[in-house]
Image: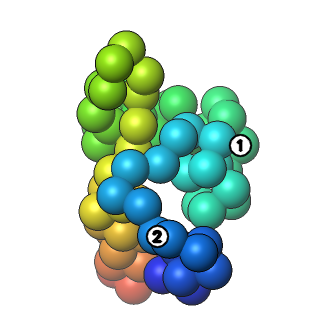
Amino acid sequence: MTAAIAELPFPKALYRLEEAMEILSLSRSVLYREIHRGRIMTVTVNRCRRIPATAITEYVTRLIEEAEAA
């Protein structure tokens, strides 16, 4: 995840859903399901949904922790 953000010329604080899909390698339906389940936090900016960079990092960390616990 960090490498994907580092590749961008100016890492951002907020990402469009399409950008988050690419960073996380998730399909649109999986991303929306994770958002609906509360596993990925979003914010609304001028009626547009965005995913904070910190939420992406937290999600990846949670996935790693779940994999290690299994």
At x 53%, y 31%, the residue is 32
Residue furthest out toward the front: 9
At x 61%, y 62%, the residue is 23
Q: Tag count in the figure?
A: 2
Image side of residue 8 versus residue 69, left or right: right
At x 28%, y 33%, the residue is 43
Say the numbered circle drawn on residue 70: none
Say the numbered circle drawn on residue 27: 1
Asked whether residue 2 appears in the rendered view, the answer is: yes
Verify CB contact (< 8 Å) between mark 1 and mark 2.
no
Image side of residue 44 versus residue 29, left or right: left
Q: Within 10 Å of the Cα at label 2, are there few (<14), some (14-19), or many (20+) other Cα atoms?
A: few
Q: Where is residue 5 in the image (x, y as percent from the top left)?
A: 53, 74
Q: Which three-letter amino acid code belongs to the residue tagged 2?
A: Pro
Asked whether residue 63 appears in the rendered view, the answer is: no
51 up-or-down from 12: above or below = above
Q: Where is residue 50 in the image (x, y as percent from the top left)?
A: 41, 37
Q: Within 10 Å of the Cα at label 1, are there few (<14), some (14-19), or many (20+) other Cα atoms?
A: few
Say the numbered circle drawn on residue 11: 2
Q: Which of marks 1 and 2 is in front?
A: 2
Which element type, helix, strand or loop, lies under badge 2?
loop
Which one is in front, 38 or 7? 7
User: Which quadrant does the C terminus fall into?
Assistant: bottom left
Image side of residue 66 versus residue 4, left or right: left
At x 50%, y 71%, the residue is 10
Q: Quadrant of residue 63?
A: bottom left
48 up-or-down from 15: above or below = above
